[in-house]
Amino acid sequence: MKSWIDVLREESQKPGKSQAKVAKELKVSPATISLILKEIYTGDVERIETLVRGKFMKETVMCPIMAAISKDRCLEEQPKPFSAHNP
Protein backbone atom coordinates (compact mmCIF):
# COMPACT_ATOMS: atom_id res chain seq x y z
CA MET A 1 0.00 0.00 0.00
CA LYS A 2 1.28 3.46 -0.90
CA SER A 3 2.05 5.97 1.80
CA TRP A 4 -0.18 9.00 1.99
CA ILE A 5 2.75 11.23 0.97
CA ASP A 6 3.28 9.11 -2.15
CA VAL A 7 -0.41 9.48 -2.97
CA LEU A 8 -0.18 13.25 -2.45
CA ARG A 9 2.90 13.43 -4.69
CA GLU A 10 1.22 11.38 -7.43
CA GLU A 11 -1.96 13.45 -7.21
CA SER A 12 -0.03 16.70 -7.66
CA GLN A 13 1.81 15.25 -10.70
CA LYS A 14 -1.27 14.07 -12.59
CA PRO A 15 -1.94 15.74 -15.95
CA GLY A 16 -3.84 18.97 -15.40
CA LYS A 17 -3.02 19.03 -11.70
CA SER A 18 -0.43 20.93 -9.68
CA GLN A 19 0.52 21.40 -6.07
CA ALA A 20 -1.61 24.55 -6.08
CA LYS A 21 -4.68 22.70 -7.40
CA VAL A 22 -4.24 19.89 -4.88
CA ALA A 23 -3.86 22.48 -2.12
CA LYS A 24 -7.14 24.09 -3.19
CA GLU A 25 -8.90 20.71 -3.12
CA LEU A 26 -7.61 20.09 0.40
CA LYS A 27 -8.32 23.70 1.45
CA VAL A 28 -4.73 24.34 2.51
CA SER A 29 -2.03 26.62 1.14
CA PRO A 30 0.22 25.61 -1.76
CA ALA A 31 3.18 26.19 0.57
CA THR A 32 1.80 23.52 2.91
CA ILE A 33 1.76 20.97 0.09
CA SER A 34 5.27 21.93 -0.98
CA LEU A 35 6.64 21.59 2.55
CA ILE A 36 4.84 18.28 3.13
CA LEU A 37 6.32 16.85 -0.08
CA LYS A 38 9.78 18.00 0.98
CA GLU A 39 9.10 16.44 4.40
CA ILE A 40 9.98 19.66 6.23
CA TYR A 41 6.47 20.80 7.23
CA THR A 42 6.40 21.83 10.90
CA GLY A 43 2.64 22.23 11.25
CA ASP A 44 -0.05 19.66 12.00
CA VAL A 45 1.10 16.80 9.76
CA GLU A 46 -1.61 14.47 11.09
CA ARG A 47 -4.30 16.88 9.86
CA ILE A 48 -2.82 16.93 6.35
CA GLU A 49 -2.48 13.15 6.40
CA THR A 50 -6.15 12.82 7.35
CA LEU A 51 -7.17 15.19 4.55
CA VAL A 52 -5.16 13.20 1.99
CA ARG A 53 -6.46 9.86 3.25
CA GLY A 54 -10.05 11.11 3.02
CA LYS A 55 -9.90 13.03 -0.26
CA PHE A 56 -7.54 10.93 -2.37
CA MET A 57 -7.42 7.54 -0.67
CA LYS A 58 -11.18 7.42 0.03
CA GLU A 59 -10.75 6.37 3.67
CA THR A 60 -13.83 6.81 5.83
CA VAL A 61 -14.74 7.03 9.51
CA MET A 62 -18.00 6.42 11.32
CA CYS A 63 -19.62 9.68 12.35
CA PRO A 64 -22.24 9.43 15.12
CA ILE A 65 -24.41 11.96 13.27
CA MET A 66 -23.75 11.36 9.57
CA ALA A 67 -22.78 7.63 9.48
CA ALA A 68 -19.79 6.75 7.24
CA ILE A 69 -18.09 9.85 5.86
CA SER A 70 -14.68 10.56 4.36
CA LYS A 71 -11.94 11.56 6.76
CA ASP A 72 -11.52 14.95 5.11
CA ARG A 73 -15.26 15.63 5.49
CA CYS A 74 -15.04 14.67 9.16
CA LEU A 75 -12.34 17.30 9.70
CA GLU A 76 -14.52 19.89 7.95
CA GLU A 77 -17.52 19.11 10.16
CA GLN A 78 -15.79 18.92 13.55
CA PRO A 79 -15.23 22.65 14.14
CA LYS A 80 -18.78 23.59 13.16
CA PRO A 81 -21.16 24.54 15.97
CA PHE A 82 -23.71 21.96 17.07
CA SER A 83 -26.89 21.95 15.03
CA ALA A 84 -30.04 20.04 15.96
CA HIS A 85 -31.14 19.62 12.33
CA ASN A 86 -30.00 16.90 9.96
CA PRO A 87 -27.13 18.06 7.68
Image: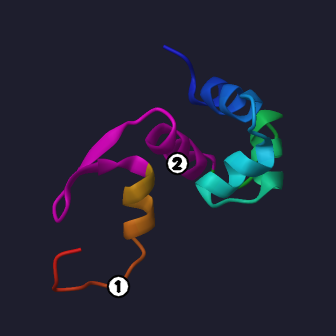
Residue with the most extreme front position: 16
Task: Classify residue 11 as left or right of residue 84.
Answer: right
For label 1, the crowd category at 10 Å Cα-Cα, with few meaning under 14, some 14 to 19 and many 20 or more, is few
Horizontal and vertical percent for residue 46?
A: 55, 46
Q: Is residue 51 magenta?
A: yes
Q: Residue at x 60, y 53 (%)?
A: 26
Q: Considering only vertical position in the picture, is 14 above or below 56?
A: above
Q: Position of residue 33 (x, y in %)?
A: 75, 46
Q: Helix or strand or loop: what does disc 2 sit on? A: helix
User: Which residue is tagged 1?
Assistant: 81
Label 2 packing within 10 angstroms: few (<14), some (14-19), many (20+): many
Upstream in sequence: badge 1 or badge 2:
2
Q: Is residue 68 left or right of residue 34?
A: left
How is the protein colored in the picture?
rainbow
Above or below, comparing residue 52 to residue 76 in the picture: above
- Residue at coordinates 28% horizontally, 45% vertically from top-left? 61
* Residue on which disc 2 sits: 51
Pinpoint residue 63: horizontal percent, then vertical percent.
Answer: 22, 56
User: How many numbered badges does the structure rendering display?
Assistant: 2
What amino acid is at disc 1?
A: Pro
Vertical placement of residue 68 versus 13, above or below: below
Q: Is residue 68 above or below residue 14?
A: below
Region rendered in magenta: 45-71
Q: Quadrant of the C terminus?
A: bottom left
Q: Name the foreground residue: 73 vs 46.
A: 73
For the residue marked with disc 2, what is the amino acid? Leu
Q: Position of residue 40 (x, y in %)?
A: 82, 40
Question: SS for tag 1?
Answer: loop
